[in-house]
Image (cartoon, rainbow, N blue to C red):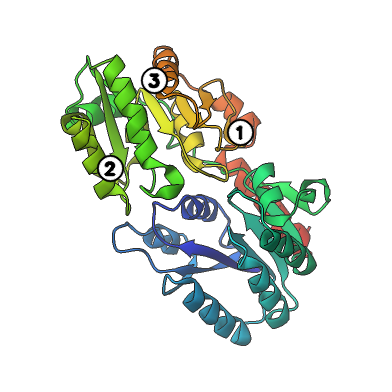
Amino acid sequence: MKILMISNHLGVQSGVQRYVQNLLLHLDTTKYRVTLFVGQCPPDQASTAPALEAHGVEILAVPDNKKDRIRALAAHLRTHKDYDIIHYHTASKIGAPVCGMMRVLCPRAKIVVHSHIVYPPMTLTWRAAHLVYQLFADYFLGCGVAAGRFVFGDHIDAKPNFSVACNAVDAGRFHPDAAARAATRAAWGITDTDRLAGFVGRLNHQKNPLFLMEVFAAMAAQDPHWKLLLVGTGEMEPEMRAAAARRGLTDRVIFAGVQSDVPAFMNAFDLFLLPSNFEGSPVTLVEAQGCGVPCLASTNVPDDGSVTDLVHFLPLAAPLTDWAAKAEAIAAHGDHDDHWAALSAAGYELKTAARRMEQLYDKLGGHA
């Protein structure tokens, strides 16, 4: 079976691309011939390409620019019309007309559109995009119900051709690991008396990093043993460094940059912070739970991925003192225990999720 998978870019900081990598590394590439059409890796990030190519995935990397990617996709489909499945990861309105273009250029393929975002407010142009998506796509996936409804329509989850594809992670990598915790904390100068809050992701508007810094300042004022470690980079890093300096927190905020061994950092944390402005169903929230780390997120983060009692939510409008108090309360009960029974039962174990995706491909491709 020939599958064309379309994603945003090859950088490891993209939550969508992390999901794509996780999924593809667990597909049977002897049965499914996968071509990944994707933007080039941003210069400040590591690429997922080497691992994917070693697993047998063909990669077509084009300029990481929306208009250029669309033109390149059209050119590719004009000469490659034999795909059985087109699996299109989308988080935008422009994906709707792209879906129509794919239907025209590759009429025999079954088109699977896969939503990864909730980005209020809902607008008339989004409503129009719902109709276009539903006109041209064959099957709809969402990283959660909220993401499916936002991109494809309010009642999409009532349709038989919709299902949730959990942002599953590898239990073999993201699990409690005392040795990794100790080694990582030692490597970054975290002592036994320090308490470590952490964040993993892109330092951009979506993740609300300046508010994260305000939350941490309130935590540090309450308990001077707190430190903050940030894994990732982004356009707002200079502003975050300046905010830390203004608050007198430079020596307590660690900018670790992009790191490949995310499980080791998750294990090092006493608390995972995710005060995002908007999300779909963040992979990092599942990764943190897999490592047994208490999580504090904004209510703008959909609760689809809140599988265990490790996850707690507060509105962004709540006083910073409330955020600090909640952080203190949940971090104090962090056990770093194994929660994979609950995560697996909810569909967040990667191998099971990959098998479910293969079953969908077989059904749509006529090989059930």
Q: Nearer the viewer, mark 2 or mark 1?
A: 2
Residue that appears at 40% across and 29% down: 272
Q: Position of residue 296 (x, y in %)?
A: 46, 27
Q: Which type of secondary structure does the marked residue at label 3 adopt?
A: helix
Q: Which type of secondary structure does the marked residue at label 2 adopt?
A: helix
Disc sitting over residue 240 in the figure: 2
Rounded to the nearest angstrom, the CA distance separating label 2 from label 3 is 19 Å
Disc sitting over residue 324 in the figure: 3
Of 199 and 168, nearer the camera is 199
Rounded to the nearest angstrom, the CA distance separating label 1 from label 3 is 21 Å
Q: Position of residue 49 (x, y in %)?
A: 40, 62
**Residue 367 visible to an observer of this rendering:** no
- Quarter-wise, where is residue 29 in the image? bottom right
Left or right of residue 21, residue 92 in this image:
right
Amino acid type, label 3: Ala
Find disc 1 in the rendering and name its residue: 303
Amino acid type, label 1: Asp
Image quadrant for the N terminus? bottom right
Disc sitting over residue 26 in the figure: none
